[in-house]
Image (cartoon, rainbow, N blue to C red):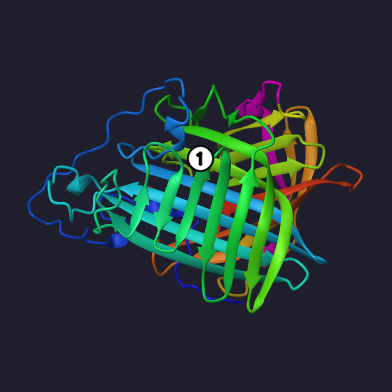
Amino acid sequence: MTSTPSLLSRRAVLLGMGGGALGWQPLFVRAQQPDLAPPPLIQRALQFPRDHGSHPNTALEWWYVTGALQAPQRPLGFQLTFFRSRVPSTQGMRSAFAAKQLIFAHAAVTDVAGKRLWHDQRIARSSGNEAGSDGVDLAHASEADIALRLRDWSLQRQDGRYLAEVRTPDFSLQLTLKPTQPLLLQGDQGWSRKGPLATQASFYYSLPQLQVDGTVGVGRQRLPVQGRAWLDHEWSNAFMPPEAVGWDWIGMNLHDGSALTAFRLRSANGQAVWAGGSWRDAPGHAPAQVLRPEEVSFQPLRHWKSPATGASYPVEWLVTAGARRFTVRAVIDAQELDSSRSTGAVYWEGLSDLLDDSGQVLGRGYLELTGYAKPLRLS
């Protein structure tokens, strides 16, 4: 298994990002610059393609793509995530070298049959120059549409399709993702509550049931793949109420074309601080059912203890989503990711099956578990 010391969770990485992300002194900064907080987040109607792009005046943002793929006689899972973090202390600087944004990315491939996980990560600073071609930035997130670049990794939208490319010493991704359904606006038309206070919210939309074609490289092999993927895009100034220590989240593509999102924010005693999600029937054109906090529950059924960290993760769940009830089961138990050398976060995130009460597999997607090794905190 490839060991990358600071793989970044799409959410966990952001929880350590304040003015000095990962404890950094931002590049070309410390010149008595006051911290400039982002403006308050105000609910509004989302507009596309603009809201596919970056929102640099918000504190935190990510674009997250996961999927279940099939190579010849070899099922695989993949993740590709780009993160953006606003650095408050540099916002008033005029220098083209000021690191006004930090861009992170991580990628991973799960080999189901081989029970292996490959992963890698990238990190770079960005001046926030929208042109992105001044030779200063190694990373860029466009404000106009999805056009993300971090060195030799990229995710972009062209002619209605999404192109993803990742190259690492151990694995690679070259994927084309084609929408088969409309955007799924989470919460109240894209305004997703994350706590009991009105200010505890994010803008959040998903694109389930993406049709995937391309190649996955593993070692010296290049495997043609097909499958289904899920895209999340979320931005906010505050993702967790202070009493929460972590969360449990699923995004599931069902075989019949339906889509399920469910999450809960957890307190130290394991109780839900807040919960939510959505259900959309196939073929995805009808409005989604928005799940209220009292309609979502996560009941752990089986735990896996990490031999590396000693953390115990619920890798099998009974999930209630409105009137529906499902079992969520990891396809591989050992999908823990340790970024303690950078963000301080240790979390579990991996390919999982969705089953009905009779044990029939209805779909496949990703499960994310944070705050089990130690609490996550916004700083």
Is residue 245 covered in magenta? no
Residue 251 versus residue 207: which sits nearer the camera? 207
Outermost residue toward the front?
159
Residue 72 versus residue 345: which sits nearer the camera? 72
Label 1 crowd bin: few (<14), some (14–19), many (20+), radius 10 Å: many
| Residue drawn at 51 percent across, 29 percent down | 192
Residue 351 versus residue 206: which sits nearer the camera? 206
Q: Position of residue 230 (x, y in %)?
A: 63, 44
Q: Position of residue 65 (x, y in %)?
A: 58, 49
Q: Quadrant of residue 277?
A: top right
Q: Position of residue 317 (x, y in %)?
A: 74, 49
Residue bounds of the magenta highlight: 285-304
Magenta span: chief secondary structure: strand
| Relative to 13, 314 lies left or right | right
Is residue 287 covered in magenta? yes
Amino acid type, mark 1 = His
Residue 163 versus residue 232: which sits nearer the camera? 163
Element type where label 1 sits in the image? strand
Residue position marked by numbered label 1 in the rendering = 233
| Relative to 369, 113 lies left or right | right
